[in-house]
Amino acid sequence: MTQTSDLAFDRIAGVRKTPLEEFYASGHRTCQGCESALVMRQFAKASGPRTVVTGSTGCMYVANTSYMTTPWVVPWMHTQLGAAGPSAIGMAAGLRALMRKGRIAQERINVISFCGDLGGGDMGLSGISGALQSPYDLLIILYDNESAANTDIQATGLTTYGAQTTFTPPGKVHRVMQRRWKKNVAGMLAVGHPTCRYVATACSAYPPLDFLNKVRKALAVGGPTFIHTFDPCPKGWDYHPSYSHELGELGIKCGIFPLYEIVDGRVSYTYDPKKKGRIPVREYLEKQGRFAHLIDEDVAYIQRRVDAMWEEWEIPGVAPLKGGLRPA
Amino acid sequence: MIKRVEINYRGIYQKTLARRIGSDLVLIASRLGKVAFSNGRYSDAPERDGIPCKYFVFVSPDLPEEELEAECGAKLDIDVADVSIVLDDTMVKGVEPWAWHGVRPINEKVSADGCLLVVTRREPTQLLAFIAAKPHPYRLATLEGDASLSGLWVFKDDLTHERVLGAVAAVDPGIVTIDAVADYLADEGREPRRAEAARTAHAATVQRIRPVAPDAGISWTYAIPELPAWDAFGEGVAVPGVERRSELGPGGQARNAGFPRGTTKTERPVVRFDLCTRCTLCWLECPDGCFDPTADEYYDVAYAYCTGCGKCAAVCPVKECIVMVDELRFEDTASPWAAYRRDPAAYLAWAEGKKGPERRSYAHITGTGVEVRPAPAVRARRTRKEVATR
């Protein structure tokens, strides 16, 4: 089995070694302080000029394609809301066929497909599952701002428990309307697709360069790969945009969003709370307007579930399973 | 006769405020026996934090409802406005809406003898230093107050809503009268302070309406793009990508010239290059990629593309190195690094002058508070070269 640290890839060794060139440029219609836009900018920077990108409907489609202008330097194609997986397969298969027929030069072209949490985590999940079983080199990035943010913040399967959204406004009788626990997409895909060699979670804000290097590593591992990013969203989470970095860092440090990578079935934690500790989830929740209606009881419930994820799960943060076969 | 009102507001932050002003103007006009309706500009949805948006109100004393709707409904934008309300004064520097209409003057739609009504703490002459000159006379009114910014879920109840209704009655009683506004606000057991706020704002605004002569204002430097019609599109909808480019120095990076979106900002980062440790974090963490690496490893700011989110100031590890400053203190989007290279001492003096003696820090949850503190004085740091030559 390949050890994570053994894998050879073109690692960006320090912030000063980060490539200067942009392939997702300035001049897009995202919100002030948009972390999903930073995800686009960073993955394009990490993957470089020989990249084709496809993206399903969502903020990062609509905000980047209005009326005959684009911030993309590399080729980008819009695909339907649930089609992040199939469009990536189509692009990769098309490139392979063109190379086989000699129509284009034989070379490595990165195929990256991105989707939001509604497009990827809910609607397009079957398509992504199909792509992760395909024989092509492709990377699917799920940028997770925890709502259908483009259409003014509707709840999705990845919205944090208790959050206010257009679908889950707190009322006088029912305070908590978002009662679903966040879907564990990266863990689900890793557990369910044992031949997929690389699954990771990341945050573009923290730790610095981690997301860029995970993109580089996923592309180097080859085959179908998947990265789930955690993107603070000033519009839907309701915080002042200057705190985008801080909210990302707090989300990781309180353990509500686990940071890890899984290479050939081996889990390694990018932020290991067992070694580095966890801050209370309250510090993360209280800085967002979407949780302003929660009371101590709700915060305690969220804290208990996060504690359980790190202390009781067999593989913390990845698989919510306990027990299993034990030696007699 | 139709009276047209447009409400210019900051996307998301003032969405609820603009909608309430619009719907209340309709309800008040209806009480006066007029026909009215309001709607948002179609191309503004879905809104993004800070990107300028518009809400419209149409009022007619004589047209039947169907005719008013046929005349004013389902349009991308209006041609003229009798009153243009501006809920955040930094928008007087121009507005670049969602759907690539170019950077437009804030008074573009104001009709002859129409009125531009700005919520501001500045004097009209200060505002006219940014506003485009118009070929015809119009009126400029100011309503003293801060931009009432809040989040998507919150309505910030700071009486801006009531005060703007009173001010509209002051600038054009043909739309609503102050008595009707006050009656409406006193209805349904609402606190008396609401109607009082409207009356006070009305009285103050009457004193603060001034005529603007045809040549007053600046000549507008932004070109308004010609939008291709549907039949001018190629097969499919393919858009040329941004040309690949990466050079050191101001403006050296590839950028989308079609939508600079600098009008999103209410504040801009001012950089003290002498304090910079070249840690790269502002550049690395900017969602808009508006920092330009330079040959001496500093990061210049492309202000035309900066949206003023303030992330760079938040992640900068050096105190006072990057500070967010009110956008209305700046005339242009020239390169700060080039100015620093030309004359470091003059640039630092200029930067400190712009920053002023106070720093604002915002509460985490949007619109819930601003703390203003005196600024610490940080002396200019000598560069290694300067130290070595001494």
Image (tube, rainbow, N blue to C red):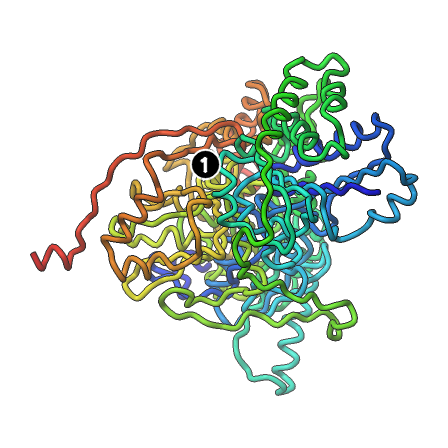
**Residue sitting at the far left:** B390
B70 sits left or right of B318 in the view: right
Crowd around label 1: few <14 · some 14–19 · many ≥20 (10 Å): many
For the residue pair B75 and B175, the one nearer the viewer reads as: B175
- The reply to whether residue A285 is visible in this rendering is yes
Residue ID for mark 1: A250
Instruction: Check disc 1 and give the amino acid type.
Output: Leu
- Residue drawn at x 64%, y 39% is B85
- Residue drawn at x 40%, y 59% is B334
Q: Is B82 rendered above or below residue A124? A: above
Look at the numbered disc 1 and give the secondary structure of its residue.
Answer: helix
Q: Quadrant of residue B91?
A: top right
Q: Quadrant of residue B149?
A: top right
- Residue drawn at x 26%, y 53% is B346
Q: Residue A190 at x, y = what percent?
A: 58, 51
Q: Residue A279 at x, y = what percent?
A: 43, 30
B282 sits left or right of B34 in the view: left
Q: Residue B265 at x, y = what percent?
A: 51, 47
Q: Quadrant of residue B101?
A: bottom right
For the residue pair B50 and A267, the one nearer the viewer reads as: B50
Q: Residue B340 at x, y = what percent?
A: 29, 57
**How many badges with numbers are in the image?**
1
Q: Is B124 rendered above or below residue A200? A: above
What chain letter is assigned to the residue under label 1?
A
